[in-house]
Amino acid sequence: MDRYFTVMVVPEREKGVKSFRIPRLAFHAIVFICVLAIFVMGILSYDYWKILRQVHQNKHLTLENRQLKEQIKLFQMKINTLTTDIERIETFEKKLRVISGFEKIDLTTPVIDQEGHETDHDHSKKIDPATLKTQSFFNGNDTIRDKLKDEKKNQNFIELKNLYEQKIATNFGLQTGYAFTKEWSDLTKQSFALAENFADFDYKFNIIKKHVKDLELNIHGLDQYLLDRESFLRSTPTLLPAKGWVTSYYGPRISPYSKRLKMHEGLDIGASIGTPILAPADGTVTFSGKKPGFGYFVQINHGYGIESVYAHNSKNTVKKGQVIQRGQLIAKVGNTGYSTGPHLHYEIRVNGTPVDPFYYILD
């Protein structure tokens, strides 16, 4: 009997007791299997709970990674916007240098060709309208956009990228000998891929920060230079004299009358008849009347060797010898003289030589 276990079942209502004889070995086996099943179920339940937790973490990391990439794109957009703003300030600063005489260049070379393209300022070459390039003095090799080019080949960028990769590797416990492998999860690969984006942002930010500092120093130096030149600036024609659109730029063009290549020595600003023409700077009127080919014509001496000319007017509102101030009405747009339509012909002359007015215009 000691080789068996007897299991008795006593019903509550029915009579009779049912008994079962189970061999001791089978009983121990059943107990062992039950304990083992409970243990295995516990392990499986724990693993399942960990998997659910890991899935939740993965979803969170995926969302976080997506948001991080969107934030990096936003930073890139902000850098591009900041770069555009700095370029505009650079152009303004260079124009101030030109009109103040702080920096000397050949003002007779067009800033923009007749097709509206900015032109090359290589003074060793003759002007050829067929070969004019789209590079301007105001977009030289030291602009902020040029400094941001080819950053992936720059040693500083490579060093920043390596530092970020080492930092990411340390976070994943891959301090030494890390390399892209098939065993890595997609999240790990994405994390390492972000190293280039981080390095790109840091690299561009450092360049922009240094460039802004240099630009600030340049403007400060220019400000010191201009402290004693207030009257000179008031006499510098920095305004576009009439509201309209530029129909013809300074530079070589085909003459509408002779049909031959001829130097156009000013800007043609298309506008309706009667549009006000305002003085772009302080000065004294040296001529107001009619001239052959120019129709009603105004010439202003701004001092410092600078003169401005306004032709094809419908009416002149100033007289010879009159002292005028910047923004004062001097004439109205017309279609007099040799003109193909209502417009203002505007010239700037330095010591009697016509120069491109775009060097002076700031608005």
Image (tube, rainbow, N blue to C red):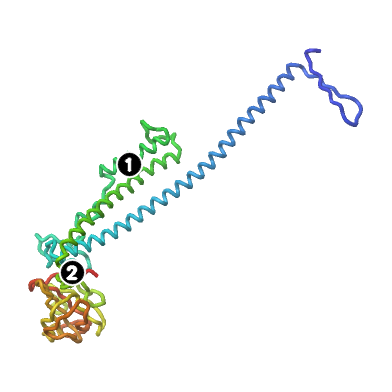
Quarter of the view holding residue 332: bottom left
Q: Identify the residue shown where x is 22% and y is 63%.
A: 92
Give the label on residue 161, or none: 1
Relative side of 166 to 48, left or right: left
What's the distance in space between the residues labelled 1 and 2, CA to CA?
44 Å
Q: Position of residue 243 (x, y in %)?
A: 26, 77
Q: Identify the residue shown where x is 90% and y is 31%.
A: 13
Where disc 1 sits, the SS reads helix
Nearest to N terminus: mark 1 or mark 2: 1
Residue lying at the far right in this picture: please name it: 15
Relative side of 155 to 183, left or right: left
Q: How many marks?
A: 2
Q: Identify the residue shown where x is 41% and y is 40%.
A: 189
Q: Residues within 10 Å of mark 2 (few under 14, many from 20)?
A: many
Residue lying at the far top in this picture: please name it: 2
Residue 22 visible in the snapshot: yes
Give the label on residue 360, or none: 2
**Position above or below: 210 against 7:** below
Relative side of 53 to 18, left or right: left
Quarter of the view holding residue 282: bottom left
Q: Amino acid at mark 1?
A: Lys
On the rendered image, what quadrant is the C terminus found in?
Answer: bottom left
The label nearer to you, 1 versus 2, is 2
Label 2 near label 1: C-beta < 8 Å? no
Give the label on residue 337, or none: none
Residue 341 visible in the snapshot: no
**Position above or below: 264 against 174:** below
Q: Position of residue 95 (x, y in %)?
A: 19, 64
Q: Position of residue 294 (x, y in %)?
A: 14, 82
